[in-house]
Amino acid sequence: MANELRRAKRYLLAATVEIVDLTTHVYIGARTSDLSLVGCYVDTLNPLPPGTAVKMRIAHDDTIFSTFGTVVYTKSNMGMGIKFLKVEHNQLEVLRGWLNKLNGGDP
């Protein structure tokens, strides 16, 4: 894992997440375990298959981050990695604010 290259630094964040599969409309309520500028990991016993297009809402610090994404990888009975897609400018500001706080920036 130490040699693993990432596009963006990950931060530990336990936050409530709601995910909807855009094809089947299956709803998953779960928790994130980490977050980055380009995606997150979601803890769930029933991950969606890689390639699944999703709409998601993450709630943290009394704010909501909403975006579209795609499931990049899964770990059976553990969770899934989701890459963010089509992040609107105002939602990007919410995400950057959270990451700034997690990085030790001003509250």
Image (cartoon, grey):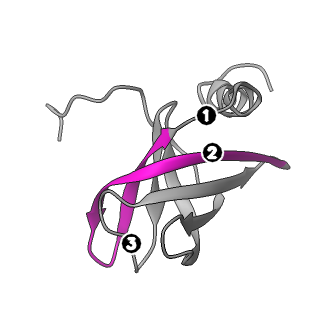
Horizontal side of residue 39 vs 55, given as left or right:
left
Which is nearer the N-term, disc 2 or disc 1?
A: 2
The quadrant the N terminus occupies is top left
Residue 14 lies, in percent from the top left, at 59, 56
The residue positioned farthest toward the front in the image shown = 23
Mark 2 lies on residue: 67
Q: Is residue 66 magenta?
A: yes
Which is nearer the N-term, disc 2 or disc 3?
A: 3
Mark 3 nearby-residue class (10 Å; few <14, some 14–19, many ≥20): some
Mark 3 lies on residue: 47
Q: Which of label 1 and label 3 is nearer to you?
A: 1
Toward which corner of the image does residue 95 lie, by quadrant? top right
Numbered disc 3: secondary structure: loop
79, above or below 6, in the image: below
Mark 1 nearby-residue class (10 Å; few <14, some 14–19, many ≥20): some
Residue 87: mark in rendering: 1
Q: Please identify the dominant SS of the magenta region.
A: strand
Horizontal side of residue 16 vs 82, given as left or right:
right
Mark 1 and mark 3: Cα distance apart in space: 22 Å
Which is nearer the N-term, disc 1 or disc 3?
A: 3
Residue at 44% across, 35% down: 10
Q: What residue span does the magenta drawing correspond to?
A: 63-84
User: Mark 1 near mark 3, Cβ–Cβ under 8 Å?
Assistant: no
Q: Is residue 58 magenta?
A: no
User: Mark 2 near mark 1, Cβ–Cβ under 8 Å?
Assistant: yes
Residue at 68% across, 31% down: 88
Residue at 42% across, 51% down: 70
35, above or below 59, in the image: above
- Which amino acid lies under the numbered mark 3 shown in the image of this protein? Pro
Mark 2 nearby-residue class (10 Å; few <14, some 14–19, many ≥20): some
The quadrant the C terminus occupies is top right
48, above or below 14, in the image: below
